[in-house]
Image (cartoon, rainbow, N blue to C red):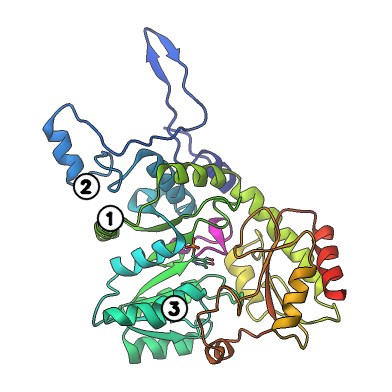
């Protein structure tokens, strides 16, 4: 029996890596500990039967870079191990495919799940800005009807499922940027009762905090650009779902070219190994920062699922267990407009104003100016994204330094 690690930390370190010991003449040949990069686009087979199997989609054989690659597959296999952490005996029933970005993952998942001309798709009203724009603006150009719903309200979700008959509901476990937490098991049951698939963007929770497939989600999506890569130097995405859905996903991926390259896959796989360490530290830091800033007189409020006054604090505790509440904090600057927020961003010394999350560095973003720029002011107001909201992605620095930099900028 091969040894299977029990903890997610060990799986993150070893996942997707086959031990490559070869025995020659009774001696064990050395093999590298760290996995390598296989950049080749083409593959040569000794016989046409194998080539035929490779062209037919045998996932163990490679034929052309857009159809699959061993370095990318190693990363995908590691992701399956993590997403199936709660059900290791069923890991063989699931697959993952890596994509060139998180948005490629959202697009691939939607296309493979029947979001096509004539269909309706529903999405959480406070989802990431580019996902919102896909549903609201881009997909309707191709004959898809998009509707939005407050995914924290199961009654509203049920009404949408009954009245709009969407083929799929897209939600984020922790929403960007309002940090609402949705009840995935409850939404999965509702979707399945009404013939809809539940697609969960788990970017902000990461598999460290929550694994949606074990709680009824049909598809899990990640922007691997964030906590998976973790160092702010590689763009990528991942989808994972049950194996029966693989042909539909693979067909779309190889026809649309929504692939991840082997060099990026290698970097993401390397990042994945330290993800539990980083996420645990970042969650702990975020909790300290949120707690310290909540009474600051320049702030009208602090949003963080780990604070007892967060509307889904209890739900988040139940879903994420003791691992944490995420590493993003929302700061509502009191009576602030665009100029005040710009002044705050420019006053920060260590925390950097940059449009991403999940890096080692602490970063801030102004949603109405950046991630949710494509929404009209009325759409932002309806969703609850105010002109004073700043998103703080907490890094791995010492939390007292993060707090001190923010307080100085608020006071300045
Ligand atoms: C929740 C969420 N989903 C998807 C994406 C898109 O990811 P990418 O930028 O890797 O395409 C982002 C990017 O910020 C995000 O925050």
- Residue span colored magenta: 202-214
Instruction: Give the Cα separation between the discs numbered 2 and 1.
Output: 9 Å
**Closer to the camera: disc 3 or disc 2?**
3
Which mark is first along the chain, 2 or 3?
2
Instruction: Give the Cα separation between the discs numbered 1 and 3.
Output: 25 Å
The reply to whether the C-beta atoms of the residues labelled 1 and 3 are less than 8 Å apart is: no
* Residue 162 image label: none
**Closer to the camera: disc 1 or disc 3?**
3
Q: Position of residue 87 (x, y in %)?
A: 45, 53
Mark 1 C-beta to ligand 1 under 8 Å: no
Q: Nearer the viewer, residue 90 or 305?
A: 305
Residue displayed at 69% across by 83% down: 338
Instruction: Give the Cα separation between the discs numbered 3 and 2.
Output: 33 Å
Q: Would you say residue 2 sits in the magenta stretch?
A: no
**Element marked by disc 2:** loop
Which mark is first along the chain, 3 or 1?
3
């Amino acid at each position: 029996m091969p040894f299977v690690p029990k903890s997610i930390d060990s799986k993150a370190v070893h996942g997707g890596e086959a031990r490559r010991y070869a025995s020659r003449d009774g001696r064990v040949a050395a093999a590298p500990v760290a996995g390598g990069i296989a950049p080749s686009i083409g593959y040569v087979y000794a016989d046409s039967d194998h080539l035929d199997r490779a062209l037919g989609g045998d996932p163990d054989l490679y034929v052309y870079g857009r159809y699959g690659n061993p370095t990318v597959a190693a990363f995908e296999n590691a992701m399956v191990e993590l997403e199936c952490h709660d059900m290791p005996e069923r890991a063989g029933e699931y697959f993952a495919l890596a994509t060139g970005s998180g948005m490629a993952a959202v697009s691939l998942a939607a296309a493979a799940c029947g979001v096509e001309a004539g269909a309706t798709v529903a999405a959480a009203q406070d989802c990431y800005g580019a996902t919102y724009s896909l549903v609201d603006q881009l997909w309707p150009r191709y004959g898809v009807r998009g509707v939005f719903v407050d995914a924290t309200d199961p009654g509203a979700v049920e009404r949408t499922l009954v009245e709009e008959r969407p083929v799929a509901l897209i939600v984020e476990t922790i929403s960007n940027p309002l940090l609402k937490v949705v009840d995935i098991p409850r939404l999965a049951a509702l979707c399945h009762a009404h013939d809809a698939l539940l697609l969960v963007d788990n970017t902000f929770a990461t598999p460290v905090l929550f694994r949606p497939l074990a709680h009824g989600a049909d598809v899990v999506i990640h922007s691997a650009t964030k906590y998976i890569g973790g160092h702010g130097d590689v763009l990528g995405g991942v989808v994972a779902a049950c194996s029966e859905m693989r042909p539909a996903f693979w067909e779309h991926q190889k026809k649309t070219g929504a692939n991840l390259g082997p060099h990026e896959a290698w970097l993401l796989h390397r990042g994945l190994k330290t993800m539990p360490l980083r996420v645990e530290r970042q969650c702990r830091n975020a909790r300290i920062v949120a707690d310290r800033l909540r009474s600051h007189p320049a702030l009208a409020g602090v949003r963080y699922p780990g604070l007892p006054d967060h509307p889904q604090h209890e739900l988040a505790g139940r879903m994420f267990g003791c691992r944490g509440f995420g590493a993003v904090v929302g700061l509502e600057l009191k009576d602030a407009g665009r100029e005040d927020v710009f002044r705050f961003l420019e006053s920060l010394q260590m925390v950097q104003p940059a449009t991403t999350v999940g890096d080692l560095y602490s970063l801030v973003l102004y949603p109405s100016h950046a991630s949710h720029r494509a929404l009209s002011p009325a759409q932002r107001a309806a969703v609850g994204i105010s002109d004073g909201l700043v998103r703080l992605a907490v890094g791995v620095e010492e939390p007292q330094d993060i707090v001190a930099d923010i307080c100085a900028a608020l006071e300045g």
